[in-house]
Amino acid sequence: MTGILCFFGLFVFGPFYDHLLGQGGVFLFVFLWSSIRFSFSATFSLLKFALPFVISLSVFGFLFHLARLLGREDWLYDTLIKCLIFPSSLIFLKTILSYITYLDILQLPFSMKFRIDLVTIKSAFQKGSRALERFSWYLIPILI
Amino acid sequence: MLFDITEDLFFGEGRELFYLSGTNGVGKTSFLEKILLPTLQRHKLPYLYLGQDMHIQLYTIKASLAITGQKIFALNENQILELWIRQGDNATVFILDEFDKYYPDYRLIFDSSKTFIQTYFLVTHNDIKLSEVFPDHFSLYKILFDLIESDAHNKRVRLTKEKIW
Amino acid sequence: MAIAPTDSVLQEFDECFLILDFNHLFIASTLHEEMWLLQTRDDRDLIAKIIQDAEEFHIYGVQEDREIDTYSGGEQAILGCLLIIALIKGKQVYNIHILLYNVLGSISSANRTILLQKFPTLWLHNQIKLYTNEGSFLKEISFPYEDNEG
């Protein structure tokens, strides 16, 4: 929880949001961390998942820059920051949540019903991720 | 997982059925998904594949039929499978991984596909009485997966091919 | 051995069914977590028993914190069964019906024989009834078990 708060408090909504080099460094760090935690191919798959959103951000950022929307001339710079933050946040959240075990959830000071709900959510996401991979696997020959 | 392949597992000479046999954990499904299927994809050989987790695959089968405009709402699972197989009549290879776990009768598969499938790969732990349901004019080969070495992290498996008939 | 449609059998036995479904064997991602969810906490004896029993099936390298997805499908099915057997004995559970759904078909005939030989004592002492499915129908497994399919 502390890690999540620090990440979002510093790099997403905080003082280091505007630092392009810092965001680049964060992106590289979470990419490496996730590659070690899971694998390079799993991390790369997650980046591919984020790609359509990054492309959309880029297209709109470019258009806003051309149009000088709201009189601003920093759309490209801001878009680049967002294109780094979005995948960083995605990879960071997936990686840090993977460290939370069912045992951690069971030991939380909440009601048993709430803990059961959290266990169910975690299990559903894990099974869902695995099912999504298998869906993709079976759909590849159909879509080629 | 390390596979020791003692002889060429070439197929495509006539009509053949390969029956993959071996105890649990020797890599039969890994062989199918990491070696056989990528090879078929690389050589652009169309295939049909019914995997071990058919409960998930049924969703993609229904999706593929819906994409091709088939109305499947009134069909049961057997009919959906049959329709999917018949739609895949450009395939020459059919791979079945523990299919009999869900549908004990292979006749559904063989009857729907024997006119266009040249090669079957079958993984099953049951004695399926192939002589009763097997399409005519197919040669039967057994590929035995034999665990040679195993420790906590690695497995070494030998694959041998044997002609049954 | 009577064969009956699944739904009607499940309806008859209502809440007294323990279902081991090959497609949804475990909730957690490690054996250790699964045992916690089943309220056995850190029962070292239980996990040691499962690891020892797994070696009878030539499943080596079983660890309580190893990701369950790293085992093959058949190995997972066997581990699920071993977990049930250990829990029933350990928690003194009686009079339930166990349904192995699409489980036996994913286990080799040799392993199936070894596995089913572990159930008679439960059947005898804990009044457990064991079922398997054939397609969408259920069949009770009687003991002594004879493997007609392998």
Image (cartoon, rainbow, N blue to C red):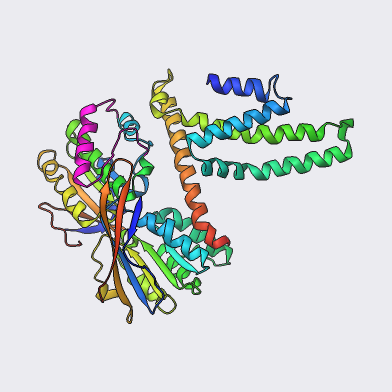
In magenta segment, residue C66:
yes
Residue B20 vs residue C12, the one in the foreground? B20
Q: Would you place residue C11 above or below residue C28 in this image?
A: below
Q: Position of residue A116 (x, y in %)?
A: 41, 29
Q: Would you place residue A132 above or below residue B15 in this image?
A: above
Question: Quick check: can you spot residue B61?
Answer: yes
Q: Position of residue C36 (x, y in %)?
A: 32, 29
Query: Looking at the image, which residue is at 59% across and 34% down?
Result: A90
Query: Looking at the image, which residue is at 16% across and 53% down?
Result: C113
Q: Position of residue C57 (x, y in %)?
A: 21, 47
In magenta segment, residue C147:
no
Image check: B31 left or right of C6? right
Image check: A40 left or right of C18? right
Quadrant where the C terminus of chain B sits is: bottom left
Q: Would you place residue B82 above or below residue B98 in this image?
A: below
Residue farthest bottom in this picture: B137
The residue range painted magenta reads: C39-67
Q: Would you place residue B163 above or below residue B143 in this image?
A: below
Query: Looking at the image, which residue is at 31% across and 51% down?
Result: B156
Query: Looking at the image, which residue is at 10% across and 39% down?
Result: C125
Question: Quick check: can you spot residue C18?
Answer: no
Quarter of the rendering containing residue A78: top right
Q: Position of residue B114 (x, y in %)?
A: 39, 77
